[in-house]
Image (tube, rainbow, N blue to C red):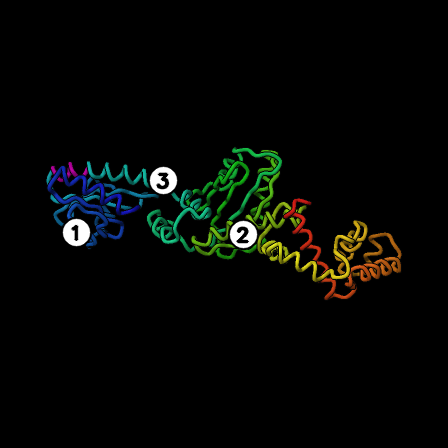
Amino acid sequence: MSSRIFQSMVVQMKEATSRPIGVVDSEGNVVASSELSLMGTHIADVNILISAMGEKFSILGGKTFKVLPGPDMHFDYAVFVDGTDETAASFCIMAAIAVSSAKAYYEEKYDRSTLVKNIITENILPGDIYVHAKELHFVVDVPRAVFFVRQLNRADVIAVDALKRMFPDQQRDFVISINETDIAVVKELPSYTEEKDLVKIAATIEKAISEDLKIKTVIGIGSVARHLRELAGRYKEAQIAIEVGKVFDTEKTILSYESLGIGRLIYQLPTTMCEMFLSEVFKKNPIDSLDEETLSIITEFFDNNLNISETSRKLFVHRNTLVYRLGKIKKTTGLDLREFDQAIVFKVALMVKKYLDSQKGIM
């Protein structure tokens, strides 16, 4: 919690008593005090306060302390008032109530889920990530994955509750509603997690929403974040996975950023560069000069790893017929698909064309 909040409160309390009032953190550092000279000093015997957490008060160094337990009942902060008499105890109780209320309000506003949402939506300064993570006792350097869940045929807010039941540990896993259709799931992972494990988690999410709510989804998976500050980038990756999938993998409902291949590169190119590439590749005739039947033959040829015999079998045509048609494609485009290097260029060109069509709304 921000020490500025505590400091503002104890300064106001100074008007009610001449006795110094302050707050110490779990390490024994004075983070707020009505006596400015005490700011930054250290309580050496902080372990005495920790051992006396269950008691009403603790007396230490001529001061009365009241411990404020944090999450999981560990020592979070303690309020102190100078003196050991009943007056000190009374002021300590009032200070503890005020500080506890401020602390509860602050933690409600800046809880872990809110922090994670602010990180992935880039609604927080990078330097503040460390500050809030420390205040919330949030481990920053454990592996985490971001799953971007988009509801397709219809959207239902119940999907958020369904996912929260799937990931009940709200101190480590976070289900965040982004808008009407989109949900982000940020899950803490074991250190040995592989991409296939992330796909299994995504498949479990998809199955649960599909079977329980009859909602179709597409799920994007970002690469593993090794630090809390990386979550924003991984969230963007999960979004990109879905957008690239809409262009190049329309049949897939689970898309991993790390498996997007060349489609990921093409998606991030400027359209002007893509158009320039197509004009350089197809100098004789534009790619639009190829009819649907010819494009189907080319696609089948690529799907069968440039194997003429297997392609002709799949197309139910004679091998010589396929060779003749490939020759016509060479004549039209200037590219011989039987040559591996030229086939690669043609394959990339088809993907670039598909991407440009998607940008123009043709698909």
Measured Cα–Cα span from mark 3 to mark 2: 27 Å
Mark 2 or mark 3, which is nearer the start of the sequence? 3
Mark 1 or mark 2, which is nearer the start of the sequence? 1
Q: Can residue 309 be spotted in the picture?
A: no
Q: Over which residues does the magenta segment extend?
A: 87-93
Q: Secondary structure at mark 2?
A: helix
Q: Position of residue 184 (x, y in %)?
A: 51, 43
**Label 3, on which residue?**
109
Q: Secondary structure at mark 3?
A: helix
Tell me the amino acid under the disc marked 3: Lys
Q: Position of residue 86 (x, y in %)?
A: 11, 37
Name the disc covering residue 237, or none: 2
- Give the left or right position of residue 317, taking residue 123 as reference: right
Residue occupying the point 32% across, 41% down: 106
Tell me the amino acid under the disc marked 1: Leu
Mark 3 or mark 1, which is nearer the start of the sequence? 1
Measured Cα–Cα span from mark 1 to mark 3: 29 Å
Name the disc covering residue 176, or none: none
Q: Nearer the viewer, residue 284 or 137?
A: 284
Q: Position of residue 209 (x, y in %)?
A: 58, 37
Residue occupying the point 46% across, 48% down: 120
**Label 1, on which residue?**
38
The answer to whether 342 is drawn above or below residue 291 in the figure is below
* Helix, strand or loop for the magenta stretch, by majority: helix
- Give the left or right position of residue 297, taking residue 64 as reference: right
Q: Quadrant of residue 117?
A: top left
